[in-house]
Each structure stands twice: as C-alpha cells, then as structure tokens.
Image (cartoon, rainbow, N blue to C red):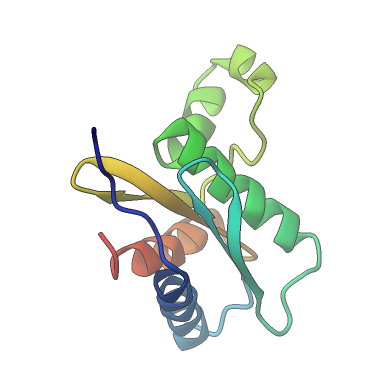
C-alpha cells in the first residue's frame, strides 16, 4: 500500500496566510484559492479590493495546476506559442498564477492567484507554496 502527504486544514490556512502576506506586502488585492490534489477547493480568501470574478479565476487556476500537475503558466505558454488546440482541453484557468504544491515528488494540492499581472500572480502563488514544499 502506498501512502501520500495531504494538506491538512492547518496547512491550508498557512498557505492562505503566506499568500496574503506576500500580496499585501506589495499592495496587491488578489484572491487566493487552495485545492487538494484532485482540484477540489479547500480554501478561498478574497482580499479587500479584489474583483469578485477573481474568486472563480483563482479557483480554476488552482484546479488546473493540481489536475495538470504543473504550473498553469506552462499551459498559457503552450497556447500562446501556437498550440491553440489546447484551448479545447477540459480545463479552465489556463493562465499564469496556478502553482502545484509538490511534496516528495507528488502533487498534494495547488494554489491559484488572481487579481494582478500574470507575473505578480505567480510570485504570490510561489510564496504561498514555498511554506509547504
């Protein structure tokens, strides 16, 4: 029987807090979504001033990073690089800002950030993931 790490509720709160700290230190209003390895939402935090639609976008980014087992920036770059057929993939949120949480080589969840420029979303997501991975 195999065993795997999982995100406990305390981990989810720590990830949300780390993302919020990074975003607020830069003056950014974002939404932070955390999912498990199957892309199921475990936590969501929309900071003051973040657009309401950013909650859906962040959730989809996290879900796509978890299920795709890679950063969503990879998907965005594939599409922008001419692989337009990938738009028909059964995933949403194929934009930069979704980052998987990897422990011992296995994806155990993901973080999705929405609300600022793509590279800023990624910066916040990676700051959040770094407290676990």
Q: How many marks?
A: 0
Residue 66 locus on image (x, y percent): 47, 42
Nearer to the camera, 36 or 117: 36
Q: Is residue 65 above or below residue 88?
A: below
Q: For this view, does 92 lie left or right of residue 73? A: right
Kindly identify the residue that appears in the image at 21 percent across and 41 percent down.
105
Quarter of the figure with the N terminus: top left
Report the residue at 74% width, 54% height from top. Answer: 56
Q: Tell me if 69 is positioned left or right of 111 in this view.
A: left
Q: Kindly give the residue lying farthest to the front in the view shown.
A: 1
**Residue 24 x, y percent position in the rendering:** 51, 85
Q: Nearer the viewer, residue 73 or 131?
A: 131
Residue 112 place in picture, x, y as percent: 54, 56
Residue reaching furthest right? 52
Image position of 17 with respect to 9: above or below = below
Rendered image quadrant of residue 94: top right
Quick one: quadrant of the C terminus?
A: bottom left
- Horizontal and vertical percent position of residue 110: 45, 52
Looking at the image, residue 5 lies above or below residue 47: above
Front-lying residue, 71 or 101 = 101
Between 39 and 22, the one lying in front of the other is 39
């Amino acid at each position: 029987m195999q065993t795997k790490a999982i995100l406990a509720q305390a981990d989810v709160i720590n990830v949300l807090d780390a993302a919020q700290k990074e975003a607020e230190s830069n003056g950014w209003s974002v939404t932070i979504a955390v999912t498990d390895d199957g892309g199921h939402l475990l936590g969501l935090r929309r900071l003051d001033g973040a657009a309401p639609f950013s909650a859906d976008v962040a959730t989809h980014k996290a879900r796509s990073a978890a299920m795709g087992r890679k950063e969503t920036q990879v998907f965005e770059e594939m599409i922008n690089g001419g692989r337009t057929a990938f738009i028909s993939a059964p995933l949403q949120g194929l934009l930069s800002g979704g980052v998987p949480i990897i422990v011992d080589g296995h994806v155990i969840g993901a973080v999705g950030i929405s609300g600022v420029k793509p590279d800023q979303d990624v910066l916040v997501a990676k700051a959040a993931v770094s407290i676990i991975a």
